[in-house]
Image (cartoon, coloured by chain):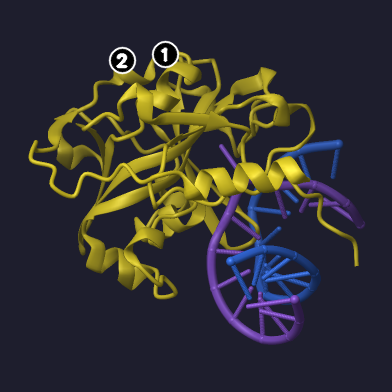
Chain colours: A yellow, B blue, C purple
Amino acid sequence: MIDRERDRHRARSARPVRSDHMTSATDRTPLPRAFFDRPVLDVAPDLLGRVLVRDTPDGPVEVRLTEVEAYAGTADPGSHAYRGRTARNAVMFGPPGHAYVYFTYGMWHCMNLVCCPEGTAGGVLLRAGEIVAGADLAAKRRPSSRRPADLAQGPARLATALGIDRALDGADVCPAAPADSPFRVLTGTPASPGAVRNGPRTGVGGEGAAHPWRFWIDGDPTVSPYRAHAPRRRR
DNA sequence: GTTAGGATGATCT
DNA sequence: GATCATCCTAACA
């Protein structure tokens, strides 16, 4: 319990490494499918600093990823794919570079990026990020937001800010042309390896809790507060 | 500042 | 019928 508190404190209070005076422009080259056709533990930390673009008729929203979690398919007790393929998780077993969107807690959507070769159900949960374009639209979708940093501070918040729902389950994130999909992932400005931290995944209990497969950019204010797995109490 | 508890429904056993 | 890869608000220190 003490350790939990300490981890949480550490994640929140680490020194900021923000670059308010950044001069180098974001690299807007889309990531190729080969980027995702790798083991999840390679892809997950490499996604930090990348920019997910979500196009809608209302306009684009772009989020710079600051926190992700890796889920390693049928061998990982924390993964939705642990018990094998079902209608819900089918997209995870498909080709890499697609969105796996699920509905949870009766209210929220969360989004993964499918990794690994087809047939291997790897996924990276997008947990948090910094809205770098379309903040007005994101704020309209998230009226309870108090400040820019919390617009996408948490997986369901990120999905809400980007207007993501089950209709986007299976969407291609590496389209041949931008018009072919509502998603793209840009090269962005990858986080330097020295700024990347990792620790146990949020909300994952049991044997899956042992894996330190949550990755985040140290000190970034948009990283969500860590919560250890807590079994729901009966009432 | 922190914490407890309710909201709400698809999914799976 | 239990379990969620969660969020928000009210209440409290």
Chain label for disc 2:
A
**Vertical side of C2 occupied by A139: above or below:** below
Chain label for disc 1:
A
Left or right, A197 with respect to A182, comes to right
Left or right, A143 with respect to A90, comes to left
Q: CA distance from mark 1 to mark 2?
A: 7 Å
On residue A38, the disc is: 1
- Residue A210 on image: x %, y %: 71, 26
Left or right, A123 with respect to A196, comes to right
- Residue A36 on image: x %, y %: 37, 21
Q: Are marks 1 and 2 on the same chain?
A: yes
Quarter of the rendering containing residue A140 = bottom left
Depth check, front residue: C2 or A67: A67
Quarter of the rendering containing residue C12 = bottom right
**Residue visible at 57% across and 52% down in the picture:** A103
**Residue visible at 25% across and 37% down in the picture:** A184
What residue is pinned by disc 2?
A: A34
Residue A2 visible in image: yes
**Vertical side of A103 occupied by A171: above or below:** above
- Residue C6 on image: x %, y %: 58, 54
Dot 2 surroundings within 10 Å: few (below 14), some, or many (20 or more)? few
Residue A77 visible in image: no
- Residue A167 on image: x %, y %: 43, 50
